[in-house]
Structures are given as C-alpha cells and as structure tokens.
C-alpha cells in the first residue's frame, strides 16, 4: 500500500469518527445547554489515534460544534473541547478511528463510488470466509460497526434527513458458497445487528419513531422477543434499508485507462460500475460523466469534469483520467 492510499484511508476513518466526539459523555447532553456559537477559530494541530486532523476536518469540527450547540446538546465550550482533544480525553474516539481504519485496510469494508453522502460504504462478504467457513461472529460485529458509521456520516455531512435513513450495502455474495439456509441466516444476522445497534444508538443519541419490518424467517439464533421489547421501549435511531449487490468492473471508453493502484478502487475515476441486484440480476449502468462525484481529499461534491480532468472547486484537488 502506498502512502497516498494510506493517507486517504486515514482521512476517511477520521471523517467517520468525528461525530463520536460530540456524542461522547464528556460533550453530549440531552439537557438543552446554552452553548456558544463559534464564528471563527484558528486551526490548531491535533490528532486522533496519532492521525493528524487537517484543516478540512477541523472545519467540520467547528461546524458540528455549532450544530450541536444550536440543538442544546453541548455542555462544554469550544475552547475546552479542543483542549480535551489535545489532552487525549477521547480514548473511545481514538479506538473507533483505529477500528474503522483497520476494517478498510483489511478489506472488510469498501468505500467506493459515492452517490450519497451517507451510503458510500459496502461490506465485503467475501472477506468473512476463513478456511472455507463463514465467520458469523465477525460478520455481526462489522454490521454493527457499519451501522454506527452510517449514522455518523449523516452527522458528518449534515444530511437533512429527519428519518436518518441508512442503507447497508453488501457485495460479493456470488463469490461465497452459502446454501439456502445460510442465506436466510445472513438475512437474519443483518436484521438483528442493525436493529440492535440502532436501538442502542437511540438510547444514547435520540430516537426516531419508525416502524420496523420483521417479516422474514427467524431462527432460535437470537432472542427476538427481548429485542422487540427493547425497541418498543427505546425506539430506533435509524430507518434501515438493505441492498445485497454484485459489483463488476466493465470496460468503457477506450481513451480511459484502468486504475494503477488500490487507491483508485476507492474513488474510481476511469471505470463504470455495473451493479446487478441479486433479486432480479437486472444490470444497471452507472456512468461516471455527469454522476454525482466526490472529491477524495475534502469529500466535497463541488467537482467539475472537463476535457478528461476532474477538479474540486473547494480544495483545488485535480486528477487527469486520460493521462
């Protein structure tokens, strides 16, 4: 892995983890505190798990502080927040950054073509096959973590979604050897761990009154009666959608070249994705030109594409897809 790829993965992990600061018991409150609004604050060099927070991340921290302040959910000043970050008071956030980073590095989760801020991570089913067996325990763990990641991304990008809808994407189903009963088990694991995690998040961060569908075959693997009772008591944080897809790379315009290193797999420029739903295997071609493309540096959507060059109008990043 080259240093550019590693920097990108660290950038993504930090972006995913930043909301964890504001949901920490050291910062977050449901008591409607009256907090300051930060109009201007000079960039200070700080880090999470020794991953440097750059100015783009710092600006997001300022914006998130103001957002939480307006909602009365911050109980410390911005100056105190920064001091606590410098003094490493957020060990849980440090740990979460490392967890997300490791999942990316180990290819359990893949950040790929970005069309919606909150839904650009996929869980790689193929990665859970170890010595011919599917690692169900690890799968449940990762589904829970990705549920938190997607909820965090709604906050990171200030997405105006009252229902806090998240979409869990799963790829590689066709590459693993699961029988019919194991497919049903996969479905049940997805439901159980997302619902349980969303319920846990609702207790900490606030709930949304949302109906849930449990219209699928259940086994004795989990105690659904207990979970349903807990959901009725605590509610859910998210409206949850599922998507299990097979993604293939297809050849496109001859003037475009295939990516040369793994970083390009995460924000593919010279490729189109053919996405095949496992339900009906109907191919859907998502083209790159004109698609809602994201800058890999600052994650802005203010990106233009002209004469084979993509350029971010916010941070200045550019890349030539013809070179």
Image (cartoon, grey):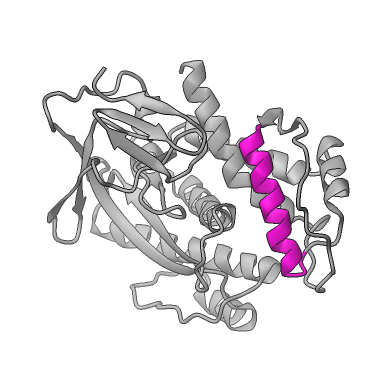
Question: 245 or 249, which is in the foreground?
Answer: 249
Nearest the viewer among 283 and 227 is 283
Residue 119 percent coordinates (x, y): 42, 54
Q: Position of residue 224 (x, y in %)?
A: 50, 74
Q: In which quarter of the image is residue 85?
A: top right
Q: Answer whether residue 164 is visible to the viewer in this image.
A: yes
Residue at x 27%, y 42% (from the top left corner): 176
- Is residue 131 visible in the rendered image? The answer is no
- Which region is colored magenta? 54-73
Give percent across and percent down for residue 279.
Answer: 19, 61
Which residue corresponds to the image point at 25% horizontal and 44% vertical from the top-left?
177
Per the image, is 28 magenta?
no
Q: Quadrant of residue 235?
A: bottom right
Q: How many marks?
A: 0
Place of residue 222 in the rendered image (x, y in percent of width and height, measured from the top left): 50, 67
Quadrant placement of the C terminus: top left
Instruction: State the residue at coordinates (31%, 62%).
Output: 184
Between 238 and 269, the one lying in front of the other is: 269
Q: Which residue is drawn at 86% across and 43% down?
A: 84
Principal secondary structure, stretch drawn in magenta: helix
Q: Check if residue 70 falls in the magenta segment.
A: yes
**Residue 148 in the figure: left or right of residue 288:** right
């Amino acid at each position: 892995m080259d240093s550019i790829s590693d920097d990108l993965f660290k950038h993504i992990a930090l972006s995913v983890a930043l909301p964890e600061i504001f949901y920490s018991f050291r910062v977050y409150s449901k008591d409607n505190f009256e907090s300051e609004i930060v109009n201007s604050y000079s960039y200070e060099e700080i880090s999470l798990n020794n991953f440097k927070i750059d100015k783009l991340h710092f600006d997001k921290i300022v914006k998130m502080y103001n957002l939480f302040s307006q909602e009365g959910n911050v109980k410390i000043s911005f100056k105190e927040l920064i001091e606590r970050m410098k003094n490493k008071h957020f060990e849980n956030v440090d740990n979460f950054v490392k967890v997300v980073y490791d999942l990316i590095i180990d290819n359990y989760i893949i950040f790929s073509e970005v069309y919606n801020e909150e839904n650009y991570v996929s869980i790689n089913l193929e990665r859970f096959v170890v010595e011919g067996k599917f690692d169900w325990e690890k799968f449940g763990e990762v589904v829970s973590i990705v549920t938190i990641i997607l909820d965090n991304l709604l906050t990171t990008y200030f997405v105006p979604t009252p229902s806090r809808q998240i979409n869990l994407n799963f790829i590689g189903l066709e590459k693993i050897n699961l029988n019919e009963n194991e497919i049903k088990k996969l479905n049940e694991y997805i439901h159980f761990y997302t619902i349980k995690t969303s319920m846990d998040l609702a207790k900490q961060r606030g709930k949304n009154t949302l109906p849930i569908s449990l219209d699928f075959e259940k086994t004795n693997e989990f105690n659904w009666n207990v979970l349903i009772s807990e959901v009725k008591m605590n509610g859910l944080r998210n409206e949850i959608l599922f998507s299990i897809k097979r993604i293939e790379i297809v050849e496109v315009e001859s003037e475009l070249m295939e990516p040369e290193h793994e970083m390009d797999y995460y924000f593919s420029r010279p490729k189109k994705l053919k996405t095949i739903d496992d339900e009906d295997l109907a191919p859907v071609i998502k083209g790159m030109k004109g698609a809602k493309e994201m800058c890999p540096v600052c994650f802005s959507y203010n990106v233009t594409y002209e004469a084979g060059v993509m350029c971010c109008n916010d941070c200045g990043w550019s890349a030539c897809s013809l070179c």
